[in-house]
Image: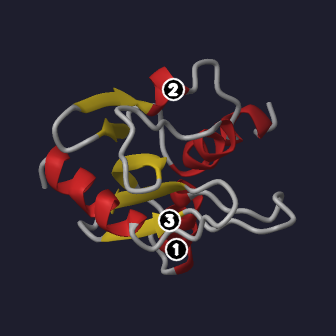
């Protein structure tokens, strides 16, 4: 699967976003090492804190179906029908990705016309994860 193909899946997922408060629609497409793609969109809530981001929706879907290893995630977002040139995962989503992925996870951002590829390590330097909790 190419970076653009995965990004286009994120665009598809974005169509299902529930954003009556911010109108900032986000879609994510998470590629499992099995080859299966898990889609996620953001789902807002009037109480704000129960809101769930697209990236976490995709991760939780995958984990709930037994997938625990991932090779890439594509994320797109923007106001209304417009895609922003860059919509990166928030800090909480970066931390959730860090729970299941190492720093080499490919993170694909942007639009179909302008794609930016980075890694989880670049987005979350000096991360804190499960290896920090292992007893010595």
Pointer 1: residues within 10 angstroms few (<14), some, or many (20+)? Answer: some
Residue 16 % position (x, y): 45, 74
Per the rendering, the mark at residue 41 is 3
Q: Regarding mark 2 in the picture, which secondary structure is present there?
A: helix
Q: Is residue 135 above or below residue 30?
A: above
Q: Is residue 112 left or right of residue 75?
A: left
Residue 44 % position (x, y): 69, 65
Per the rendering, the mark at residue 123 is 2
Q: Regarding mark 1 in the picture, which secondary structure is present there?
A: helix
Q: Which numbered disc, 1 or 2, marks the residue that appears first in the sequence? A: 1
C-alpha span from label 1 to label 2: 22 Å
Pointer 2: residues within 10 angstroms few (<14), some, or many (20+)? Answer: some
Q: Is residue 1 above or below residue 89?
A: below
Query: Looking at the rendering, in which quadrant would you find the N terminus?
Result: bottom left
Per the rendering, the mark at residue 61 is 1
Q: Are marks 1 and 3 in contact (CB under 8 Å)?
A: no
């Amino acid at each position: 699967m190419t970076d653009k193909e995965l990004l286009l899946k994120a665009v598809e997922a974005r169509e299902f976003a529930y954003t009556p408060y911010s109108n900032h629609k986000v879609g994510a497409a998470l590629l499992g090492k099995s080859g299966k793609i898990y889609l996620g969109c953001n789902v807002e809530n009037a109480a704000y804190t129960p809101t769930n981001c697209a990236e976490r929706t995709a991760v939780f879907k995958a984990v709930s179906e037994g997938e625990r290893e991932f090779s890439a995630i594509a994320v797109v977002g923007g106001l209304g029908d417009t895609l922003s040139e860059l919509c990166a995962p928030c800090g909480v989503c970066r931390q959730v990705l860090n729970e299941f992925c190492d720093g080499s996870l490919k993170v694909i951002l942007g639009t179909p016309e302008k794609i930016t590829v980075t890694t989880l390590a670049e987005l979350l330097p000096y991360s804190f994860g499960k290896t920090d909790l292992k007893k010595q």
